[in-house]
């Protein structure tokens, strides 16, 4: 027999009573709604032996007041596997209103607003760590932070893996440092917290939203304070960029309004894009522009959004935080968002808009109202698959209707595939794509370089030296992991460039090996570079009175040196740059046909003796 359930859904509640997400429907006029009944959890759970590296995870808020949040998995063949967290971990569940998930390395991190839904029988977690390949739970945290009485003081929002050793948990009360080696939550980053201790402000006044890492810094959006810029080496805020104060006419009076930030994303070119809110009150209203921040120079540009029927503003959701419908392509230098009117449209959208950064052009990718269906976007709405550049899009009809669908849309706005689902109030939060590929370093990365008196510093731009098939190349973290021996060579990565220098004057031959490390979303590869330091011959005086000879000289194609034992040879330009290094035997020729015309100096090392000769290349 069908059972009718009547829900009274209130907009806001304190931390111990209600999570936010699909719970703030009263703001959209959904009060005392007749909700259709759906199958119980147990009727659709099934035992699986899944390969979770091939497909897509969908993190769901699920049905508030009845059950904890869930994760579904869509295989590459288009088959749904429902509630895989519960399936793989009997007796364990996520918390209430899980809004964020991300895979880093071999771990899957899930953040919930609270530890248990009021209608759930099992207490879950605010922060859960799973094996990304098996979905087996590794660690669960009922609380992110507690006061002296044991009460929660931080509801979950987001998570940013900083590196393989730690991450930052964004909450309703600041950023908390997670030690991934010890699997323990530590202290709060000073200056990131919420000054309100109770009531509405405790949850919805000074929240932390999305965070990104760029240029060895972390950029975190704070609802009240603006953009927090954090040094991950010290876990300290080094700078705060506040949203502007702008004048606005309200009811005939001109007032100064403190604007706010909504979300932050990194585009393919490495720059950061920040959405704007009309105020910091969290009412969902947005502004007709966004900011573009260069993470190396901190230069900020304003990009106006041409608001129209086909182009909407970028949404924000401080009123009931979601990850927001705002993201970037890993394949093209474009950003996308769930276009909405200025006043906002809580949880619902109908169009996906975009901005081509290189062409400086706005476009509408798709308008759902013009399709042959009656679907709309829910919540965050979509994310782009970093490997295929397709949008995985959440669709529903009405809040009262437990019918949901996932649509795959390509970057031309064409619906590629529709995936219907079993009936349930899923209310999807965010898609999460498996990370299978490791970063690949370009063959153009030099295996060796030489530092000389004339050129004691070497600089190599790393931006185009490494790629990752299923991640954002601009997000790859580069660093120097070792220099052996540590003196007299110094190497650092700064502003996405490798800089190698000497710590003293170059007076004799030195050799060191530098190991450069590339971390792409927790998958790490290294590359070695041999660095030698020597004073290259650059004058005729240095080659006077030689005992060895080069012939022919001038040379066209090849040369020989009258040695009687094996020797090491090094060929330098007149500017001291080494262009050739090899070992030759007596009577062996040296190919110089590829060298440009000009003066060269050849250093011959044999039997502990070094001589320098001059050669003319025709």
Image (cartoon, rainbow, N blue to C red):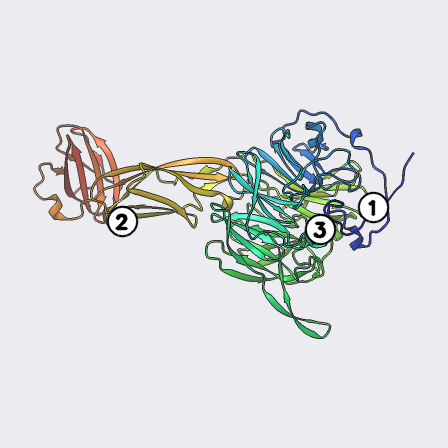
Query: How far is the residue under mark 2 from the one under mark 1?
Result: 70 Å
Local packing at callout 1 (Cα closer than 10 Å; few below 14, some 14-19, many 20+) is few
- Look at mark 3 in the image and give the residue it sits on: 320
Local packing at callout 2 (Cα closer than 10 Å; few below 14, some 14-19, many 20+) is few
Residue appearing at x 68%, y 28% in the figure: 89
Question: Mark 2 or mark 1: which comes first in sequence?
Answer: 1
Residue 60 falls left or right of residue 558: right
Local packing at callout 3 (Cα closer than 10 Å; few below 14, some 14-19, many 20+) is many
Q: Name the spot of residue 292 as percent of width and height, x first.
A: 54, 57
Residue appearing at x 69%, y 47% in the figure: 381
Q: Is residue 496 above or below residue 486?
A: below
- Tags 2 and 1 in contact by the CB under 8 Å rule? no
Q: Is residue 587 above or below residue 351?
A: above
Residue appearing at x 46%, y 54% in the figure: 296
Front residue of this view, candidates 193 and 574: 193
Front residue of this view, candidates 208 and 434: 208
- Tags 1 and 3 in contact by the CB under 8 Å rule? no
Residue 478 is drawn in which quadrant?
top left
Tag in front: 1 or 3: 3
Question: Mark 1 or mark 3: which comes first in sequence?
Answer: 3
Query: How far is the residue under mark 3 from the one under mark 2?
Result: 57 Å
Q: Secondary structure at mark 2?
A: loop
The answer to whether residue 617 is visible is no
Q: Secondary structure at mark 3?
A: helix
Residue 282 falls left or right of residue 543: right
Could you tell me how many numbered marks the image carries? 3
Mark seen at residue 556:
none
- Look at mark 2 in the image and give the residue it sits on: 455
Residue 588 is drawn in which quadrant?
top left
- Look at mark 1 in the image and give the residue it sits on: 400
């Amino acid at each position: 027999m069908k059972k009718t359930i009547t829900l009274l859904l209130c907009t806001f509640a304190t931390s111990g009573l209600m999570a936010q997400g699909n719970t703030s429907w009263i703001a959209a006029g959904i009060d005392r709604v007749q909700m259709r009944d759906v199958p119980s959890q147990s009727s659709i759970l099934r035992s699986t032996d899944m390969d979770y590296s091939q497909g897509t995870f969908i993190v769901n808020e699920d049905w508030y007041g009845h059950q904890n949040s869930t994760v579904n998995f869509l295989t590459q063949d288009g088959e749904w596997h429902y509630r895989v967290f519960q399936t793989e971990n009997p007796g364990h569940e996520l918390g209430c209103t899980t809004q964020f998930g991300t895979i880093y390395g071999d771990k899957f991190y899930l953040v919930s607003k609270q530890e248990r839904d009021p209608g759930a029988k099992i207490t879950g977690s605010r922060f859960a760590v799973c094996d990304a390949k098996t979905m087996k739970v590794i660690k669960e945290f009922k609380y992110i932070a507690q006061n002296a009485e044991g009460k929660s003081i931080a509801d979950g929002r987001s998570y940013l893996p900083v590196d393989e050793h730690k991450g930052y948990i964004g909450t309703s009360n600041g950023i908390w440092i997670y030690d991934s080696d010890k699997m323990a939550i530590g202290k709060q980053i000073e200056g990131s917290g919420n000054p309100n201790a109770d009531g509405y402000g405790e949850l919805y006044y000074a929240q932390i939203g999305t965070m990104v890492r760029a240029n060895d810094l972390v950029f975190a959006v704070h609802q009240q304070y603006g953009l927090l810029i954090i040094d991950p080496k010290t876990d300290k805020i080094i700078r705060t960029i506040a949203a502007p104060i702008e004048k606005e006419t309200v009811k005939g009076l001109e007032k100064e309004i403190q604007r706010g930030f909504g979300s932050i994303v990194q585009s393919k070119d490495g720059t950061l894009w920040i959405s704007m809110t009309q105020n910091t009150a969290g009412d969902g209203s947005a502004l007709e522009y966004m900011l573009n921040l260069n993470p190396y120079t901190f230069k900020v540009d304003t990009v106006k959004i041409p608001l129209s029927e086909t182009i909407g503003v970028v949404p924000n959701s401080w009123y009931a935080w979601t990850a927001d419908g705002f993201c970037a392509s890993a394949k093209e230098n474009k950003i996308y968002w769930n276009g909405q009117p200025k006043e906002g449209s809580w949880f619902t959208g109908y169009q996906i808009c975009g901005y081509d950064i290189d062409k400086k052009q706005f476009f509408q990718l798709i308008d759902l109202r013009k399709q042959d269906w009656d679907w709309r976007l829910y919540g965050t709405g979509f994310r782009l698959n970093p490997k295929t550049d397709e949008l995985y899009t959440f669709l529903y009809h009405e809040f009262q209707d437990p019918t949901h669908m996932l649509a795959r849309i390509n970057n031309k706005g064409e619906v590629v595939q529709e995936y219907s689902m079993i009936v349930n109030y899923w209310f999807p939060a965010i898609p999460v794509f498996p990370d299978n590929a490791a970063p690949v370093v370009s063959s153009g990365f030099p295996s060796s370089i030489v530092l000389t008196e004339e050129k004691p510093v070497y600089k190599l731009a790393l931006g185009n030296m490494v790629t990752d098939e299923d991640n954002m190349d601009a997000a790859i973290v580069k660093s120097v992991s070792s220099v052996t021996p540590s003196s007299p060579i110094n190497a650092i990565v700064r502003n996405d460039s490798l800089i190698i220098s000497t710590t003293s004057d170059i007076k004799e031959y030195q050799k060191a090996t530098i190991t450069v490390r590339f971390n792409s979303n927790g998958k790490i590869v290294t590359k070695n570079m041999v660095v030698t330091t020597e004073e290259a011959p650059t004058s005729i005086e240095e080659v006077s009175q030689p005992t060895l000879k080069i012939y022919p000289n001038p040379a066209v194609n090849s040369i020989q040196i009258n040695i009687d034992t094996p020797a090491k040879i090094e060929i330098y330009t007149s500017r001291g740059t080494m262009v050739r290094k090899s070992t030759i035997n007596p009577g062996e020729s040296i190919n110089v046909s590829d060298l440009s015309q000009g003066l060269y100096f050849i250093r011959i090392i044999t039997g502990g003796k070094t001589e320098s000769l001059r050669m003319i290349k025709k």
